[in-house]
Structure formats: C-alpha cells, structure tokens
Amino acid sequence: MRPFSTAFRFLTIFPWYASPTIVPEDIGRSTSFFPVVGFCLGLILVLVNWLLDPYLASEIVSVLIIAALILMARAQHLRGLGGTFDGFRAGGEARAGFTVAREDRGIGIFGLLAVLVVIALKFRATEVMGDARSEGLLLAPMLGRWAMVILAYGSDFADEGIEQIGMQHVRASQLVLATAIALALVIIFAGRMGLWIALWASLLALLSRSYLYRRAGGLTDDHFGAVEEISETLAFVLFASL
C-alpha cells in the first residue's frame, strides 16, 4: 500500500495516513500507481456530474467539474504548465529562459495564457462531450498521469527538485505496470476509441520529451506538470470529438 499512498499524497490534495517522510525512491516506486490515482479522481468527477447534472445547466456543471479537478490536484500541474510556457519566452536563449522560470515561481503572460487556454479547452470539451462524458471524465485524468510516467522513464533532468529526483527512480517495471493498468482501464471503459486516445497521449509525452531536451537540456518539475496538463486536455478534447 505504501507506493499507492505515496502516489495519492504526491498527486492530490487529499490526506492519506502514511509515514510523513517520503524519500525520492518512494516517488519512483509510486509511479506505477499514477494511473490509479488519476482514475480515482475521474470517479469523483463522474460522481459530481451525476449529482449535479439533473439540477444545473450543462455549462455550470462543466465549470464545477473542472474546478473540482483543479482543486483535487492542488493546481500543481497548472503551475508547472505556466512555468514551462514562461520558459519559452526566452526565444533563442531557451535554456536561460527555463532557468529564470524555475527561479521565479511567479507566472508571466505566456504562462497565464497557457493556463487559460487549457482550462477553457477542458471546460468546453466537458460541456459538449455528450454520451462520452462519463468515459472522458473517468479516463482523461488517468491518461494525463500515465503520460508523466512515460515522460519520466529514462529521462535526463535539468535541476535537482524533489520531483525530478524521485522521477529519476522510475524503472522499467514501474512503466510496464503503469501502462498495463492504463490500457486495461481504457479497454474496459472506452474500447477501441479509448486506445486511440491513449496512443495520442503517449505520443505527446514522447514528443514533448524530445522537444524539451532540445529547448531546456533536460526535464524540470514544471515540465511534468505541463505534459500532464496538455495530455489530459488532449484526452478531454478527443473524447469530445471522436
């Protein structure tokens, strides 16, 4: 249970009774259960939708669903998204820009724009999802967190934050188990359509790693948040579109 409790504490706002001390190796081992944590968040979103949909307009329900998701994740991935896009403002001095973005924990105009676009896309996708809403709410958070494991495995890192140190301990066994869990859930709840969406989420994680290597010389904690948010948003959009 320790790896699961570590993943739950690491990725969500919810307290979990466990040892208060988390060492980097614990985070690496816990990544096997990142998709499970995402799926648990999805279950809560489905419950919120089930409770509110009979009484409120679809637009209002969609706003509350996305607000609940942001709250449950402590907005930590949105912060990473903002930091990553602020790093892009450096233009030719990309690595210097990412260094400045890591040192300045505020959010600039590029980061703010990225956060607003992602939230708007999630809200609109949830609103128009129709019959696929339950599947989308269940699986999009799971796919976003699975993408973090794909990004972490075998990666080089650009700084020494606790997230990166922990992610450096992701081994093939964690990636294989996380992938098996993610694909099993996708097949059970969304079938072939879900597999296509999972494929795109995994490709996004791999392409993002290659791009961020060129731009920043390695991964930072912000990059994990950015890839999670973008992969999750892509899943929301595809569930609304396919």
Image: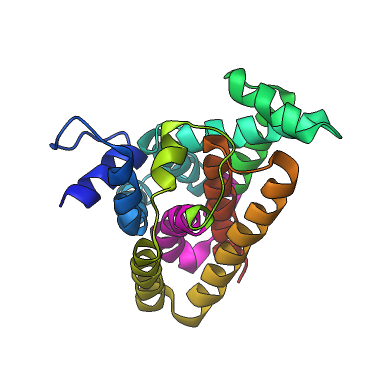
- For the magenta stretch, what is the residue range? 122-150
Is residue 71 positioned above or below 210 on the image? Answer: above
Residue 65 can be seen in this image? yes
Pinpoint residue 167: horizontal percent, then vertical percent.
Answer: 43, 46
Q: Is residue 34 magenta?
A: no
- Give the image quarter of residue 23: top left
Q: Residue at x 37, y 64 (%)?
A: 178
| Image quadrant where one finds the C terminus | bottom right
In this view, the residue farthest toward the bottom is: 192
| Above or below: residue 5 compared with residue 146 | above
Choose top left, top right, bottom left or bottom right for residue 237: bottom right
Percent x, y of residue 102 = 60, 25
Left of 96 or right of it: where is 46? left
Q: Is 208 left, or right, of 14 in this rendering?
A: right
Q: Nearer the viewer, residue 21 or 42?
A: 21
Note whether 240 is above or below 1 in the view shown.
Answer: below
**Residue positioned 45% across, 56% down in the render:** 149
Residue 72 at what x, y percent from top left?
Answer: 36, 37
Taking the spot 59% from the left edge, 43% from the top edge, the residue there is: 219
- How many numbered callouts? 0
**Residue 136 in magenta?**
yes
* Prevalent SS, magenta region: helix
Within the image, what quadrant is residue 39 found in?
bottom left
